[in-house]
Image (cartoon, helix red, strand yellow):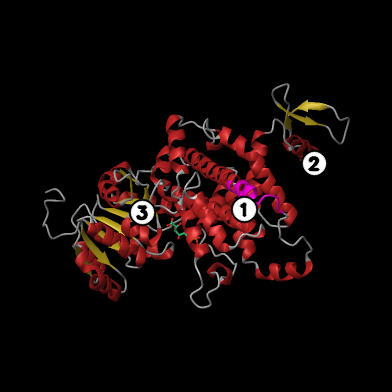
Amino acid sequence: MTDTQQAPELAQVGVVGMAVMGSNLARNFARHGYRVAIFNRTPARTDAVIAAHGDEGTFLPAHSIEEFVASIAEPRRIILMVQAGDPTDATIAQLLPLLSPGDVIMDGGNAHFRDTIRRESEIASSGIHFVGCGISGGEYGALTGPSIMPGGTPESYQLLGPMLEDIAAQVDGTEPCCAWMGPNGAGHFVKMIHNGIEYSDMQVIGEAWMLLRAAGLSNAECADVFARWNTGDLDSYLIEITSEVLRQKDPRTGADLVDVIKDRAGMKGTGTWTVTTALELGAPVNGIAEAVFARATSSHDDLRAVAQQTLAGPVAELPLGDREEFVEDVRQALWCSKVIAYSQGFDEIRSGGKAFGWNIRIADAASIWRDGCIIRAKLLERIRAEYDADPGLVSFMCAPSVAPELAEYQGAWRRVVAAAVTAGIGAPAFSATLAYYDLARAPRVNAALTQAQRDFFGSHTYERIDIDGHWHLDWSGDRSESPA
Ligand code: 6PG
């Protein structure tokens, strides 16, 4: 019998982990007409989902993992929405003895892609499919339509893909924000890059806000500026919520909420993984790295306490010419920095795809990020189109429709970075992405001197611009050059 002809009362999909993300994902499946088995290590959690949302569709609540597995039609499709790390491994270990070849376990948490590669190889011999899947969009997205980035085998995508595409966000109501990213860890790798870009996007928005504030705009005026920007090229979820946040008053004191929040950023680590992986891959993602380090600096309490007392610098006020001109300069600088940060993120996807043999189709990643996820933005449609037109595009910032815009805006970008430096406002992502832009386009950079220095102290050799081969100069002897 096919899986749909088996006893009709069996579930078509099962979700383990009834915290908000897991329960919302289960509700999303149920709202789309699927029979959904649900299980949580704490049965009361499962009961609470049924009590609050049982009328939204067909749920099969289970109070034991055995009951849960038995309630799912084969080949079983089981989605783990539990904490990354040991809890995921523990849940897999509980499930495996109860499953049959051909069943699928999908990990929908924020797992590290190397853990996913390990997990898939560990259970491959059992004939059970393991899929690492990035899911972006937060709690609301899980319920109403996230962006879904599954890895795993093509066969597992045949089993899971159709239902994931059903519940994903739909661009223009027709294009699901879900596509197979590639084998084993590719899905979680792409989600990791998503989060790295998310960090950099949030950082450049934060730097723009600090600059506008230093220019004398109130939070309410900044909210108006971001709302206006959100109607143009910067149209994105993060710009939209930034305007909302900056307008929000503190319900306790009536002050601007953002001004009563401690300026110490947290991070669960996915952005950090993007940077450490980039270092391993040799993929320059300095815009993303500066965002991670800016969060770390913000929460480095000891350093900031001492530095505020001991380090001199200008008071962060911007001597302004025309305010509207400055605001427009900041918009152009924000767009440029955002383009560079996204370009770097997609460059890392390209590097990772090559290094791990995934050959991820970058246009697909851009396409499924157009809606549902945290970095959803108008810019992603342009990125998709450029990589669709030229899958071998070396970098989005060099794309035919983008480079001219960067050329037009880079003057403002430089003025804004210079203003930030002069006013003593730390804008690491604005300045690092500009430095990357200039290093990338420079005909000659300092690396020639680096090579000579390395050959001087370590005989690491260098290449020449006029003849092939690797060469070493006898720095401590007669300074003659010889082939390495
Ligand atoms: C998403 C989010 C989600 C999580 C972030 C925030 O795509 O839905 O990125 O994964 O909320 O990772 O976590 P940190 O900022 O603490 O890393």
The residue tagged 1 is 290
Instruction: State which tag comes first along the sequence, 1 or 2.
Output: 1
- Residue 272 placement, left or right of 466: left
- Residue 23 placement, left or right of 56: right
- Residue 304 placement, left or right of 5: right
Identity, as a three-letter code, of the amino acid under mark 1 = Glu
Instruction: State which tag comes first along the sequence, 2 or 3.
Output: 3
Decide whether the magenta segment is chiefly helix, strand or loop: helix
Label 1 residue SS = helix
Q: Residue furthest right?
A: 478
Which label sits in the foreground, 2 or 3?
Answer: 3
Q: Are marks 1 and 2 in contact (CB under 8 Å)?
A: no
Residue 212: image location, x then y, percent: 62, 56
Identity, as a three-letter code, of the amino acid under mark 2 = Phe
Which label sits in the foreground, 1 or 2?
Answer: 1
Residue 93: image location, x then y, percent: 34, 62
Residue 177: image location, x then y, percent: 35, 46
- Residue 361 in view, yes or no: no
Q: CA distance from mark 1 to mark 2?
A: 31 Å
**Looking at the figure, which quarter contains the C terminus?**
top right
Instruction: Confirm or reject: label 3 Cβ below 8 Å from ligand 1.
Output: yes
**Which residue does the image show at 28% across and 76% down from the upper left?**
44
Label 3 residue SS = loop
In-front residue for pair 19/79 = 19
Q: CA distance from mark 2 to mark 3?
A: 53 Å
Which numbered dot is residue 41? none
The answer to whether residue 136 is above or below residue 39 is: above
